[in-house]
Image (spheres, rainbow, N blue to C red):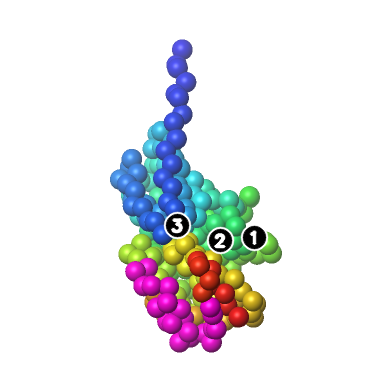
Amino acid sequence: TKEEMLITKTKIETGIGERSKVTLPDGSTVWVNACSSITFDNTFGNEIRMVSLQGEAYFDVQTDSLKPFLVHTDHFTHRVTGTSFNVYSFSDEDKTSIALLEGGVTMEYGTAKEKLYPGEMFSYNKKTGKGYREKINVTHIATWRHGEFTFDNRRFEELVKRLERTLDVQFVFENKHITQERFGGTLRDNYSLDMILKVIKTSIPIRYKENGNQVIIY
């Protein structure tokens, strides 16, 4: 009788302001962004290569057409053979997305399938249940792994989520309208909070005051 294999799991988890670069057993590389985790077990690579993701990660996957590479998130399974892509899927946010830099990815959701092409980002809103694809500058989307955040016309509320995970600050909006304002530019994670707020102020007319690790936007 064949003994059942004991399943052991490996989890790589990051905290606020942390990033981690991981090499998987097949030689694929994963950069895990702040407040995120990837999990895989010791069956990885037997027949399929499967990881689960909470948060944001950039994948550089070794090509192996016989062993599909699957990334599970809350709502999607991303199926690839060899490719580079960025997945953003935080359980406390309505929007989840995948951006493809090179190769090919098929997203599986229930019985639906959607194929993505290089230079495209597919975003899905959990509240509305609607998904849409857009052409983007994909090189900007994954610069975070080098400590740089480049935003192309992103809403302020999206920007704030990233800052909270990178800098250990909390934004409080007394002025709710400003969350929908759009920002374009580059921020580095070695900038001080004051410097970041000054850069944002060149694009968005924010007024703010700091209170401990809170930034109150009024």
Q: Secondary structure at mark 3?
A: loop
Label 2 Cα crowd, 10 Å radius (few <14 / some 14-19 / many 20+): many
* Inter-mark Cα distance, 2 to 1: 8 Å
Q: Residue furthest front?
A: 212
Mark 3 near mark 2, Cβ–Cβ under 8 Å? Answer: no
Residue receiving disc 2: 96
136 and 73: which is toward the camera: 73
Mark 2 near mark 1, Cβ–Cβ under 8 Å? Answer: yes
Q: Which residue type does callout 2 highlight?
A: Thr
Q: Residue furthest top?
A: 1
**Vertical order, 192 against 50 (above or below):** below
Label 3 Cα crowd, 10 Å radius (few <14 / some 14-19 / many 20+): some
Magenta stretch bounds: 188-209
Q: Residue at position x 60%, y 57% from top? A: 92
* Inter-mark Cα distance, 1 to 3: 24 Å
Q: Is residue 116 visible?
A: no
**Residue 27 image-quadrant placement:** top left
The numbered dot on residue 126 is: 1
Q: Residue at position x 33%, y 40% from top? A: 25
Label 1 Cα crowd, 10 Å radius (few <14 / some 14-19 / many 20+): some
Horizontal and vertical percent position of residue 99: 46, 64
Q: Is residue 94 left or right of residue 115?
A: right
**Residue 199 among those drawn in magenta:** yes
**Which quarter shows the C terminus?**
bottom right
**Residue 27 among those drawn in magenta:** no
Horizontal and vertical percent position of residue 72: 52, 48
177 and 45: which is toward the camera: 177
**Vertical order, 5 against 52 (above or below):** above
The numbered dot on residue 16 is: 3
Q: Secondary structure at mark 2?
A: strand
